[in-house]
Image (tube, coloured by chain):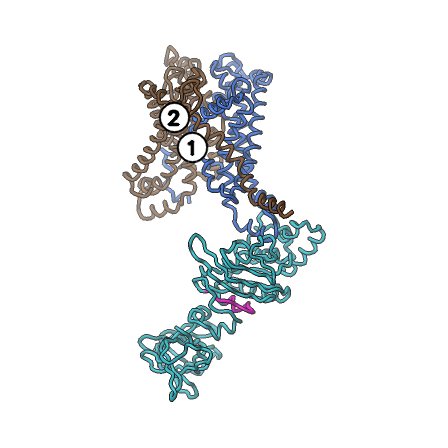
Amino acid sequence: MRNIKIEHLSKSFRGDIILEDLSLTIPGGKFFALLGPSGSGKTTLLRLIAGLETADSGNIFLGNDDITKTPINERRINTVFQNYALFPHMNVFDNVAYALSIRHVPKDIIEQKVVKVLKVVHLDRFIYKAIDQLSGGQQQRVALARAIINEPDVLLLDEPLAALDLKLRERMLVELIELQDQLKTTFVYVTHDQFEALTVADYMAIMNKDGCIEQVGTPKEIYEFPTSIFVASFVGTTNIITGSLSISVDQADAIEVADLGKLAVAVPADKSWAVDGAKVAISLRPEKIEITKQEQVGFSNMLRGTVHAIVYHGRSTQYNVRVSDTLVLQVFEQNEEHFPQEVIDYDDQVYLYWQKENVVLLNQ
Amino acid sequence: MEKTIPATSKALVVSVALIYFFLYLPIFVVILFSFNNANYPYVWSGFTLKWYQELWYSVEVWDALQNSLIIASSSVILSLTMGVLVVWYGSQSILSRFVGMFYGTLAAPEVVLAVGLLTLFATLTVELGFISLIAAHTLLGLGYVVPMVHAAFHGLNKSLAEASLDLGATRHQTFFKIILPLLRPTLFAAGLLVFIVSLDDFLISFFCSGSSAQTLPMYIFSMIRSGSTPVVNALSTIMLLVSSLFVLSFSFLHVRRLGWRL
Amino acid sequence: MNILIRMRKAFAQEMPFFMALPAFVWQMLFLYIPLICVVALSFLHINQQFSLSSLTLSNYGMLHNPLLWAVIGRSLLLAFCAACTCALFAYPVAYYIALHTNRFKNICIFFLILPFWTNMLVQVYAWFFVLEKNGLINTLLLNMGFITEPIRFLNTAGAVYIVMVYCYLPFMAMPIYSILDRFDKRLIEASLDLGATPWRTFLHITLPLSYSGIRTGFFLVFVPAFGEFVIPVLMGGGKKMFVGSLISYYFLAALDTHRGAVFTVISALILLIVSLMLNKFLKWLINVFVGKGY
């Protein structure tokens, strides 16, 4: 499967710059997620790849072919629209067969292929149903079937699960992963929901509100090693603690935080901006913090605080702990036992422990 | 739900009933006396169908009807074709900004339109007759077709055309396989409307037909001018029947909304 | 070969323009150009060819004739009264159908719009039949002994007025119904719940929010009624002229096209100005009685 290479793409609408000089490589044959907040331009980028919009400048390559100027209907790229865009005057069969019927493929081959693809999306019992008789989830599958029947090089999905309820969404995510595994087509999945993105993606890119790509990588890389405060905050929950870096020969590297003193950090060699006195922040994920009422040893960092709020999440419990006048830290603790040995309650004095290796150092 | 709206005051019901009475009394009387067996239509002298017979054998009525039908059908075909083309193809070219031009027909009083057309035909020394009437009625038709089709077209889900193109169809295929089928109810309603407007039109036909083509309304006008006879009553009754059929079929097209938004 | 392909591509690209063109050409040719012709005609002498130098204002001298202004004024008054009366009649009917009927709604609507779909000549004829010297009313009154001689109903301004209201009533009823049908009935419920009487609810909630329908209907009646030809001619006789009948006289009877053009232009201008003024007036009216923003 061929890569998609986007080079120096720019697009503006009526004077508003949506994308500026954007470059990105989407690896072929993988499930790629494009994650970003609403208004970040990710749908615009998707539409540019599909050919539904034309870029002001820049190029899009599919493998070695420059498809920047190729019209929509000639690109071997198909889209699953957010509102499905199923043709209301056709039934399921005709909708799915559309891409083939306009190419005048013989009727028996069409029937064969339609039945096959409907089996793949588990809709083989609904072949001749009218569109308005289908549920949201079923309509979504029809849209999917319609888009893959022609075996395109790339399948674009524009927030396809947005209209479904939670349980259905979780199931569809798994089905999409299996589908992509089976077809080996490049999937480009656009969403603002970071849970969806982390679940399905082999690779993902994060776009910020200004239409710039902040980071590209595997979900694990992005979650565990974000390269900016935006990425750290947008993907998952995190505690951002700001301060200034203190690096000296005779003392361990640390970050100097107002009201809290020094917290130990590990400064990676490749972060060249991490010099003594630099304004930095650390991203500390709530699940990396150990919360306990008793003193512990073996951790590089410790803070004392008061439990400010407790939120029960079923799988985990969230504690908001006030550690200073200006800072409240979120802590997640997995509910491993029915009857926990240590019960933490409101206004309890607790200790927070974490290792400096589990913290990400970020530039402010 | 009905109970929570202010209780229907007797005054309201009575006034509504009176208004309906006002609307239908003349019509009822006309229908009634079309069956009257008397030469002067004010005294009831028994039931008869002879006026309908006279109508049936009247050459002028059939001629006028034929003319009206030919003109109406031509206007429908022309205005629907041009209207659909202008809405679909116009949306893809710079002309889309000028759609407002088509709302001018309904904004001007008909007499001004009639005078304009007459002047135009005189200036171009076009002989008044079928051609001028068809041209004029098609203009009227466009004034209904374009707003209706334009509204319906822009009410369609925009993603549908995009999806069609995305799946590999050309603009032509998208138009014929997706857009046109979805616009069909509107086109039927618009066509029906233009047909009736053309059949009913009097003023523009009066100005622009010269002496050759007489339409049905023009015939009725000349008959009324020469005083009432029961034959006109019979013709009126039949036309009422036809109108009722049209209204029923219009509402069965489930486009009552469009019918209101003339 | 390359050139031919490029030409085909260019043509395909510009094709939408050419496909959409016929309708525009038609509209220009049969609506806008004629209007320009009429205006041009008003500035030319009889039998003169069109050229910029021959434009003259002499035809406009006929505007000194007060009779012309009487005709215009009469038509304005008639159209205005007809529109007001239509509003008065149509609103209760539309209100009743939209808010008070359930099972009979479709039947009521059918009978309300049926006259609209009937040929106007049939409608006029119906009143002709009822009002004429040997018509229904006179016959009844004579037979019942209330009068000894038939009353002359026809050929009066009153007859024109009645038939005008009759023919244009559906034009007013439809936009009002349209708005009331989409009206959120829960607003009425809320008003009653807060303690207002039905009448106050109507005055302060229903009426202001349906006012735009009344305004639309007003102009749907006023504009055509101003230039109406059939009703004044058939019901008003030839004595008193209205705008429609006078224009027809100029163009079809007297064949005085240039003066006719002047009259048409002036009438159209007056209609436009009066309509704009009336629009402002109607907007001001609702503000005075209820409040801003309608």
Q: In the figure, is residue B237 to the left or right of A352?
A: right
Q: How many numbered markers are drawn?
A: 2
Colour cyan, chain? A
Q: In the figure, is residue A277 to the left or right of C112?
A: left
Shown colour of chain B: blue
Instruction: Give the residue type at disc 1.
Output: Ala
Q: Chain of mark 1?
A: B
In the rendered structure, find residue C265 and report the number of the disc placed on it. 2
**Number of other residues with Cα within 10 Å of mark 2, as a class: few under 14, some 14 to 19, many 20 or more:** some
Which residues fall within the magenta stretch? A195-207
Look at the image and tell me in which quarter the N terminus of chain A lies.
bottom right
The answer to if A203 sits in the magenta stretch is yes
Colour brown, chain? C
Q: In the figure, is residue A52 to the left or right of C212?
A: right
Residue B98, visible in the rendered structure = yes
* In-front residue for pair C68/B193: C68
Residue A165, percent across and down? Answer: 51, 61
* In-front residue for pair A120/A241: A241
Numbered disc 2: secondary structure: helix
In this rendering, is residue A320 above or below B53? below
Q: Nearer the viewer, mark 2 or mark 1?
A: 2
Instruction: Give the residue type at disc 2.
Output: Val
Q: Residue at x 43, y 81 (%)?
A: A267
The residues tagged by marks 2 and 1 sit, at their Cα atoms, a distance apart of: 15 Å
Look at the image and tell me in which quarter the C terminus of chain A lies.
bottom left
In the rendered structure, find residue B107 and report the number of the disc placed on it. 1
* In-front residue for pair A247/C149: A247
